[in-house]
Amino acid sequence: MRFLTRLLQRLLIGAVGLVSVWLIVFVVFEAADRRLPWFLALAVTYAAAAYIILPRALRMGLKILQRKSVPSFTITGDGLPGDPVNIALVGTIQQLRAAFATLGWDEADSLGLRSSWHMIRAFVFKSPYPTAPFSTLYLFGRGQDIGFQKAIDNSPRKRHHIRFWALSLARAEETIGSVGFWLNTDRPSGEERVVWVGAGTKDTGLSLTQLTFQVTHATDSDTNAERDYIIAELSRYRVIEEVTAYRSGEVLPTERVNHYVTDGEITFANLVVVEP
């Protein structure tokens, strides 16, 4: 029975792949090629394939496989594993902002048309954009609540950055170490003291996403080193205390997902009140 199920899944995924190729080559490209110069036809075809057809084909493939997300990783808009979760800080939003301001990190702008255009210009002309927006990754059923970054060599293409999702302390204490901890969808309200679950990575340049070939930042695969760097900076400026390491009870292999390498360890710490 399992063999037949896998065979059927592979046949369905193969059909999805063939339909995607047919749409890209024989529908989008041929239609664009009849109406536009060849270079514009290629550009339109790439945009349709990378941002419309392939993401939907991937989501359909994941549904066919009935593959659930790995809890220790964030999820991209296409439903694939994204940046690994590697840091959790306990405190208020004011403490979180004050801590990263002390480190000299900037809070990321909200993603929108204006900030995206500003980011594109910064990429093309290599001009600084210290508060550049982040693409949206998902955890607890929602996009990140806040993010911080520090440019490397004043470049818009290279940066240390981290996204955070808020989780209520009560909910975390009830579910920590279980799948429920990661699948909780409640967003804490107000200015309460919460757990800020973070995914920190280091951008190193430009790249294309795997499978969908969307333009994005290239990232350093060693997320353990980035986690240790961020924690070391927070410790050096004395804005955290009671630093401990926690390894999720997740039984799925987490050593390598996409191009990332991670030991599955999450560093927890308490934020302290930063003196003005």
Image: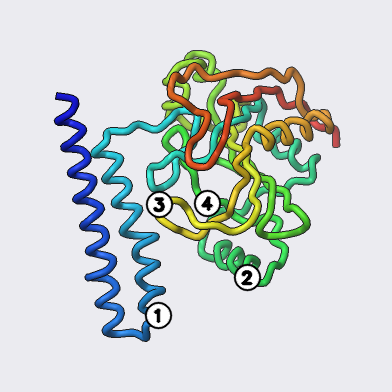
Q: Secondary structure at mark 4?
A: loop
Q: Quadrant location of residue 123?
A: bottom right
Q: Secondary structure at mark 2?
A: helix
Q: Secondary structure at mark 1?
A: helix
Q: CA distance from mark 2 to mark 1?
A: 19 Å
Label 1: how many Cα within 10 Å (few below 14, some 14–19, many 20+): few
Q: CA distance from mark 1 to mark 3?
A: 22 Å
Horizontal side of residue 115 vs 41, given as left or right = right
Reading the image, the residue beneath label 2 is: 124
User: Of label 2 and label 4, which has the lower sequence position?
Assistant: 2
Per the rendering, the mark at residue 135 is 4
Q: CA distance from mark 4 to mark 1?
A: 26 Å
Three-letter amino acid code of the residue under disc 1: Leu
Q: CA distance from mark 2 to mark 4?
A: 18 Å
Nearer to the camera, 101 or 257: 257
User: Of label 1 and label 3, which has the lower sequence position?
Assistant: 1
User: Of label 2 and label 1, which has the lower sequence position?
Assistant: 1
Q: CA distance from mark 3 to mark 4?
A: 17 Å
As drawn, the residue found furthest toward the top would be 174
Q: CA distance from mark 3 to mark 2?
A: 24 Å
In the depicted structure, whether residue 41 falls above or below residue 53: below
User: Of label 3 and label 2, which has the lower sequence position?
Assistant: 2
Reading the image, the residue beneath label 1 is: 40
User: Of label 4 and label 1, which has the lower sequence position?
Assistant: 1
**Picture quarter with the C terminus:** top right
Label 3: how many Cα within 10 Å (few below 14, some 14–19, many 20+): few
Horizontal side of residue 117 vs 93, given as left or right = left
Reading the image, the residue beneath label 3 is: 211
Three-letter amino acid code of the residue under disc 3: Leu
**Front label number (4 vs 1):** 1
Q: Secondary structure at mark 3?
A: loop
Three-letter amino acid code of the residue under disc 2: Val
